[in-house]
Amino acid sequence: MTTVEEPARREGRIRDAARTKAEILAVATEEFARAGYTGARVDEIAARTRTTKRMIYYYFGGKEQLFTAVLERSYAVIRHAERDLDVEHLDPVAAIRRLAGLTFDHHEAHPDFIRLVSIENIHDAEHITASETLSSLNSPAIDVIHRILEAGRAEGLFTADVDAVDLHAMISSFCFFRVSNRHTFGALFGRDLTAADRREHYRTMLGDMVIAYLTAGRPAE
Amino acid sequence: MTTVEEPARREGRIRDAARTKAEILAVATEEFARAGYTGARVDEIAARTRTTKRMIYYYFGGKEQLFTAVLERSYAVIRHAERDLDVEHLDPVAAIRRLAGLTFDHHEAHPDFIRLVSIENIHDAEHITASETLSSLNSPAIDVIHRILEAGRAEGLFTADVDAVDLHAMISSFCFFRVSNRHTFGALFGRDLTAADRREHYRTMLGDMVIAYLTAGRPAE
DNA sequence: TGAGTAACGAACCAGTTCGTACATTAAGTG
DNA sequence: CACTTAATGTACGAACTGGTTCGTTACTCA
């Protein structure tokens, strides 16, 4: 152990700034999502890394900036997924249904992201507000929805003149709530909203709801 | 100050167990909602009370039990409001619309409760699960929805055979999200979902959405 | 090749935080 | 009025926590 090196084990372990930084971010994402901002421990994040706490401060500056970096990376993933939506070749009804379905899938696939957003809301979105990267981040999804809605109205399919941002809020709220509130909802109503065998049911329900809203004759107002 | 009593000031200050307990609960509710479970400080709660930290441990046992007590009291308020729903004298469509409206109003009126539920979800609802009071708490709202749906189906008004719990999830998700995620949503999309001048717009939108879903001819399935 | 620098680690520190031991006092009760 | 007990306040401590200090090592480029 003194003179003999263990090449396989030590490989790539030393002097890799990008890797160290990425590893800290990955572990921090898990830890913040698990325990909340205040509940997350810098020491714990460091311990689960192949480096030390010193490096967290070296690369990120502090706990607050680390959390902001975690949020920035997480939102970047979403933005990336939204850029690949590719639904505008479909007819408006199918396009909206597919968009809602993909939003549904994405929320289900990223529960850690949902938790981070919940946590950030508990802290009044102060990190997002302070981050130039995030506050100037336009969602491609809004543009997609906007164009689909216009096409749908042009074809006389959609009677409701909904705003794209509002529709996005409507779709997101169901997808988000289903994941974010699954624990309290399950405990209080005895129903697991994220149970695998009800997945298709809720996915369809969301699509039905949105399409029904967009295609229904507006009620008296 | 030594012999002369100040009746108005000292009135009801000493030896009032019920009052001390209630005051601790009220302050703790604010503090937990403000800072989260881990972020809330027992010392801070005590300081904002007319009593000391000793009393928190005397009456509640510890931070964890105090948080559970806060949740129990908060949910009791909801349950109480739900018992006074009184919408079943209306026709099914009006009843659902009114129920959705009242749910909407209740969420808007109790942002602290929303935050507590978000916080409890971050902690996987472990306090609710452990509390007998809460885990055995049936929501009157579900029964109300159930009966309205049956009436609506009997009258041939509602074509969709939605489950009451699912419809409750659908209504709640929008009401909840609008309050819980207002900070991140506002920061990212530049739209304040809780702005007073858009309140009626969203209230109507929710009602339209639910009714459209319930009355629409079901899509191919 | 050797000096400069980016990357890294161990140990430490000052302030905080939950919880408790101990002392005290108001209010019933016989 | 003694006497018991529920209710309350003070002071303290052990463990934790974010952040820092100081020193070391691998890489690179003149």
Image: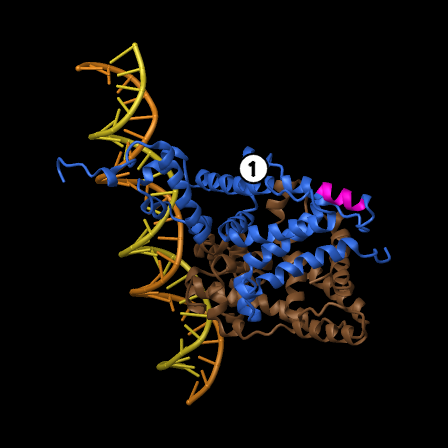
Chain colours: A brown, B blue, C yellow, D orange
Chain of the residue where label 1 is placed in the rendered structure: B
Farthest right residue? B220
Of residues D28 and B75, the one drawn nearer to the viewer in this rendering = B75
Total count of labels: 1
Quadrant (top left/top right/bottom left/bottom right) for the C terminus of chain B: bottom right
Q: Name which residue lies at 54% across and 75% down.
A: A136
Specify the quadrant that holds the N terminus of chain B.
top left
Is residue B144 shown in magenta?
A: no
Residue matched to label 1: B134
- In percent of width and height, residue A112 lies at 59, 57
Q: Whole-percent x and y of residue A180?
A: 60, 53
Q: Is residue D4 left or right of residue B85?
A: left
Classify B212 as above or below B190. above
Rendering coords of residue A24 (x, y %): 51, 63
Give the left or right position of residue A84, taking residue B78 as reference: right
**Residue A177 location, quadrant:** bottom right
Magenta region, main secondary structure: helix
Q: How crowded is mark 1: few (under 14 residues within 10 Å), some or many (20 or more)?
A: many
Amino acid under label 1? Leu
At horizontal 62% and vertical 68% (from top left) the residue drawn is: A77
Magenta region, residue range: B146-153
Q: Nearer the viewer, residue B74 or C12?
A: B74
Image-based side of B120 in relation to B98, left or right = left
Q: Quadrant of residue B23?
A: top left
Check residue B152 for magenta coloring: yes
Judged from this view, the residue extending furthest toward the left is B2
Quadrant in which residue A153 is drawn: bottom right
Q: Is residue B195 visible?
A: no
